[in-house]
Image (tube, rainbow, N blue to C red):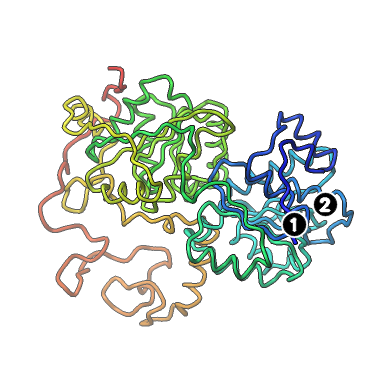
Amino acid sequence: MYERVFVTQFSDLGLAKPLLTALANKGYATPTPIQAQAIPAVLQGKDILGIAQTGTGKTAAFALPILHRLSTIHAPAPRRSCRVLVLSPTRELATQIAESFKAYSAHMGISVATVFGGVKYGPQMKALAPGVDVLVATPGRLIDHIEQKSIDISSAEVFVLDEADQMLDLGFLPPIRKIVSKMTKNRQNLFFSATMPTEIGKLAGELLKDPVKVSVAPQATTVERIEQRLIFVEANRKRPLLAELFADNSFSRTIVFTRTKRGADRVAKYLMASGIEAAAIHGDKSQGQRERALAAFKAGEVRALVATDIAARGIDVDQVSHVVNFELPNVPEAYVHRIGRTARKGHDGMAISFCSDDERNLLKDIEKTTRQTIPRFDRRNDKALAAMAAVADKLVPAERDADGNRRPDARALRKADPRNDVPSELRNTRARRRRAKGGGQGQGQGGGKPQAQGQGGGRPQGQGGNQPPQRQGQQARNGKPAFGAKPTGPARVGEGMGRRQTSEPRWTPLD
C-alpha cells in the first residue's frame, strides 16, 4: 500500500547528502509540486504515471530518486550495459536530461552517457563499452546500438519514458515497444507525459504495474505567469510584423516557432537580412549545427532562435523573454509546449501568436484545448505592414509555384504535421526499410530509379547511377510535363529579369 508523503523541503525527502549538496549549490531548497509528489513514490520503488505541463521540474522528479537509488545500491554496470535507461524524443532533450543527471550527481561519481542520431557511432560505442550507470537515448539510435550489440539493456533496473506524448507525435511508439521487449520485466517504470492521448494511455497500461498517478495540473493548461497575446494578420505580412516586434529591445531572448523546417530557415534568413541576429534549429540540421545555434542563443549572441515543434520541449534556456508563434501548430497541445519555453523557474514571460485567416480553425482548437480565450489584436489591412511586406519580399523572396504565382507562407510546403519533422535517426531507419522492400535495381524492374525514356524501373542505359534522368521527351501519360521538366507554358514571373544581389539597401524595422 502506497502512502503519500507531503514535504516542503528537499531535506525532508531523505535524499543522499551529495544530492542535497548539489541542490543547495544550485539554489534549490523547495521541491515543485510534481517533485514533492513523485520523489517519495519513486524512492519506495513504485511505478509512476506522471502528468505535468512543461517547465514544472519533471526531470528532477525522476533524476533525484534514481541517483539516490544508485548511491545506496552499489552495483557497477556490466560491460556494454546500463543500470538506468531514459528515453527522450529529441537530441536536445536527451542532452538536457543528461546534463541534469551530471549536475545532480556531481559529488557521487555516477557515470552518464547519451546516445542519439546525427553524430558518429564511434565515440558513443566507446562511452558504452565499460558500462554506464545512466543512459539517456533517443529510440532510433538506441535500436541501432542494440542491433550492433554495443549495448545490452536487458539488465536495466529503471526505465524512464519522458515526454511520451511527443514520442507519439513523432511516430516512436513501435520503436519503444521494440526496446521494451529487450528489457527485463523486473524493473521500475517511470512514465511522464504532458498530455494523455488514447494511444499513450494504452502504452502506459502495457508498461506500468500498479502505478502511482501524479498529476499537478489539468491536461494542456498553460503556465499562469505567461502573458498571452494573439494578433490577426495576413500570412504574407507576418515577417514584417515579426521584425516590428524586434524593434522593441525587451525582445532580448526570443524563440520563434514555425510549422515547417524550410519555413524556419526562411524566417531566420529574413531576420538576419533585417539586421536581427537569428539562428534556425530543426530536424534537418546536423547535430553540430543544432548545438552551435543553441549555444549562441544561450550565450546571448543571437536574439532569435527560430525552431520547429521538434524543439518545443527540447529547449531549456533560462530567461527566455518571449515566445512567438509565427505559425499556429496543427496539434493544439503543441501550443502549450511552445509557450512553455518562457516563464520558467519562477520568471515571467510573454507569448505572442500570429493568426492568418487560414489558421482560424487551428486557433479554435487551441482555445478549446486550453479552455481559455487569448486576448487578441487586429493588424489586418495595415498599410505600414503592407509597405514593409513589399520590402520583405525583396530581402527574402517568397516562394513561387511552377506558374510563377506567389505561394502564401502557410501553404508553401505540404500540409505541416509534427510527424514530418521526425529526427534523422528515425527517418533514416524508415528509408532503409523502404529500400529493403523495394528489391534490386534490375532493368525494367520497379525497384530502381525511373529511366529517362519511359522504360522500365532500372537506371538509364549508359549513365552513372547518381546522374539525373534525361529531360528530353519526358511526358506524363496525362499530357502534363513530367517531374523535373521545364514548363512549356508562359514564362515564370520575373524570369529573365535581373535581380540586385548586393545593391539592395538593408531594411530594418526602425527605418
Identify the mark at residue 70; answer none if there is no mark: 2
Q: Residue furthest right?
A: 74
- Asked whether 309 or 468 is in front, the reply is 309
- Mark 1 — residue? 84
Q: Count every numbered label the image shows and give the total.
A: 2
State how far apart marks 1 and 2 are (Cα).
9 Å
Whether the residues at callouts 1 and 2 have beta carbons within 8 Å, the answer is: yes
Q: Quadrant of residue 230?
A: top left
Q: Quadrant of residue 357?
A: top left
Of the 4 image quadrants, the one containing the N terminus is: bottom right
Residue 111 is situated, as x and y percent measured from the top left of the image, at 79, 48
Residue 103 is situated, as x and y percent measured from the top left of the image, at 74, 38
Q: Is residue 196 visible?
A: yes
Q: Residue furthest top?
A: 511
Q: Give left or right: position of 209 versus 372.
A: right
Residue 240 is situated, as x and y percent measured from the top left of the image, at 28, 30
Residue 293 is situated, as x and y percent measured from the top left of the image, at 52, 36
SS at mark 2 in the image = helix
SS at mark 1 in the image = strand
Q: Give left or right: position of 481 versus 75.
A: left
- Mark 1 or mark 2: name the one nearer the start of the chain: 2
- Asked whether 185 or 406 is in front, the reply is 185
Q: Give left or right: position of 478 versus 364.
A: left
- Asked whether 238 or 70 is in front, the reply is 70
